[in-house]
Amino acid sequence: MLLRFGTRTFIKSLLIAAGLPAILAAQSPYTLPSYPQNPAGVPSGYNAPVGYGMPIAQPQINNSAPVSAPISVPVSGGAAVPGYSANGFGNGLAPSSIASGMSAPNITAPMGSVQSVPGSSMPNAVPVSGYAGQAAQYQRPSMPTRLVSNATFSDEPTMSTSEAFQSSNDPSGNCQSCGTTGYTGPTMDSGLDYSCNGLPWCDGPSNSGCFASLEALLFFMSKPNVATFGDEASERVVTVNGVTYMFENSLDSSWISNDGAWGQRLDFGNVNQDCGWFVSLWNVKQAQTYSTTGVSFVPDDPSGLMRGFVDGNADGIDDDLDGDNIYGRNGIDLGTFDAGPPPGFIPPLDGQPDAGAPLDQGDMLTWLQTFNTVTSSNKLTLINAELNRLYRVPGHSWSHEIDYYYGIRYMQVKDIYNVTANGGFLGQSVWNAESDNNLIGPQIGMRWSRRTRAVGFSVDGRFFAAYNRQDNDLRGNTASNFAANGAANNPAALTSESFVDGFGNDAFSPTGELRADMILKMSRSWAFKVGYTGLVVGDVSRASPKIVYALPRSSLRDVDSDTTLISHGVNFGLEYNR
């Protein structure tokens, strides 16, 4: 910045001082070029040299008599003297018509004065703003204009908005569609003010040429339906030590929330003239964890693996819970032993099995599982990649643009739910469920942008018609720490088991995205960007409700495969536009 407004100004002053005599000499009326003369001594019809691409209708000669004496005809604000007609200045004046038979040539000029030169019959037009003449110092008009493809000026905003301007006062601007007459002449005055009233960034179309933006994302994503940790159908009334109550699952997934998730987004591309392309890459990851203690857990147990025998007095004999004198797996009590003769058993019963007997299932009960600690986690990840072809709608100025685009897009929505439980008969048990949604398909979109000076606004809407291949998987194990020895006061037939399950679905997942951004220019190429992004994805599979908690092996069920995922939040970062 210092170089632009400090050192440059100093060097410019030195150059002007050094070349001042030559500049003054160039302004002398006697240094004008000679023009062809007709036999009457009046300049013939001619075409003035083109300045920087602005063709000007030239004066037409009516062959009247030459000027005989030095005169000065003031022309201020376009006041005309009949005789000559010079059109094309764009100053709003009605062109004068050629008047035949007049004795002296006259000219309509945009502003300034016209004076004759001693010894010459050709009026000398003092260089003024908007006039293209040889050996003159001039600059581009400051009026609101549009640079069109044939290098003329027009006040009608009807041309393509892809023509890239460097500055409204910059005659060497980077016009994408200039022809052979556009900015191809001699180098213009480099001392012109291109800073746009001190704001060097307030001109130029957005996203012209190469552009890129890198942003941080903070999204809030909708949570899945609440799922119970355990099997609700297996909850039941139990009596323990004379106390009757409902034994039910004490944990569910309601702890999952729509907390903010951080990510990043990279957009880059190129717009050349009225079309271009761009790529958008972004990802967001939401990770949540919840831990608790003393969790009641009721699995689906169709095989009765949680049933077992009781040894309440620790005598090593299964208790006779149903009172039929059969002690679980240890046999039947026949009475008190009598040596006889003959030897045998006589009343009373002594509470000791005396002979073998079939296993008495009436002496079994279902053990209740309570985990000492349970840690649950849920990770939701969104990954996006898209390639789009962009077209810019003509008929708008660079400060008011409408783009439309189409392309191909891929998005992955990965939902992972994990539960790790320790303690009790089933410790350690692990359930890890994963639902992958792989969306791919065509996309269309439209963007409107508005820029005023150093601030810009844009609204971008996209529709993604996605085919969704859903892959759902479950892996885990139960009772990995359980010693399967068949001892009393434990589940009798429980053993450690591992399990794997999965299935796939095909779905149509329509997706809509909305972006609204504000751009604050910091320099000509760099800007700070802040905005809002909203995303709605249909028919998404979520993992946590799919787990069937069962013994010996858990599995998946096809539920919540058509949920709607809503994600929205803020984005902010930097944008570079060359």
Image (tube, rainbow, N blue to C red):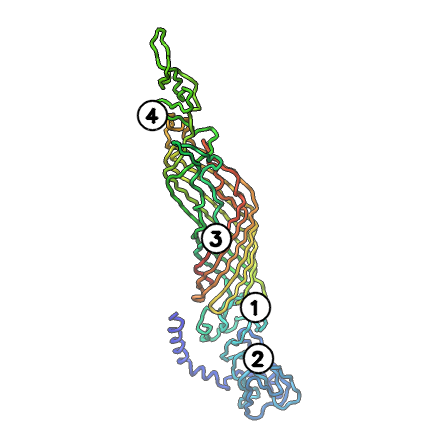
What crowding class fits label 2: few (fewer than 14 Cα within 10 Å), some (14-19), or many (20 or more)?
Answer: some
Identity, as a three-letter code, of the amino acid under mark 2 = Asn
- Circle 3 SS class: strand
Earlier in the chain: of badge 2 and badge 3, it is 2
Identity, as a three-letter code, of the amino acid under mark 3 = Leu
Task: Name the residue furthest right.
Answer: 100
Q: Name the residue under label 3.
A: 281
Earlier in the chain: of badge 3 and badge 4, it is 3
Task: Name the residue furthest front.
Answer: 348
Q: Name the residue under label 1.
A: 179
Q: Nearer the viewer, residue 157 or 265?
A: 265
Q: Name the residue under label 2.
A: 91
Earlier in the chain: of badge 1 and badge 2, it is 2
Locate the N terminus by quadrant.
Answer: bottom left
Can residue 47 be seen from the camera position used here?
yes
| Residue 124 place in picture, x, y as percent | 54, 85
Residue depth check, mark 2 versus mark 3: number of the one nearer the observer: 3
Please tell me whether residue 255 is drawn above or below residue 193 in the rendered image: above
Can residue 485 be seen from the camera position used here?
no
Please tell me whether residue 98 is drawn above or below residue 179 in the rendered image: below
Earlier in the chain: of badge 4 and badge 1, it is 1
Q: Name the residue under label 4.
A: 313
Which residue is rendered at x = 52% and y = 73% of the image? Answer: 185
Please tell me whether residue 440 is drawn above or below residue 99 in the rendered image: above
261 relative position to 444: left or right: left
The answer to whether the residue labelled 3 contacts the one labelled 4, judged by CB atoms less than 8 Å apart, is no
What crowding class fits label 3: few (fewer than 14 Cα within 10 Å), some (14-19), or many (20 or more)?
Answer: some
What crowding class fits label 4: few (fewer than 14 Cα within 10 Å), some (14-19), or many (20 or more)?
Answer: few
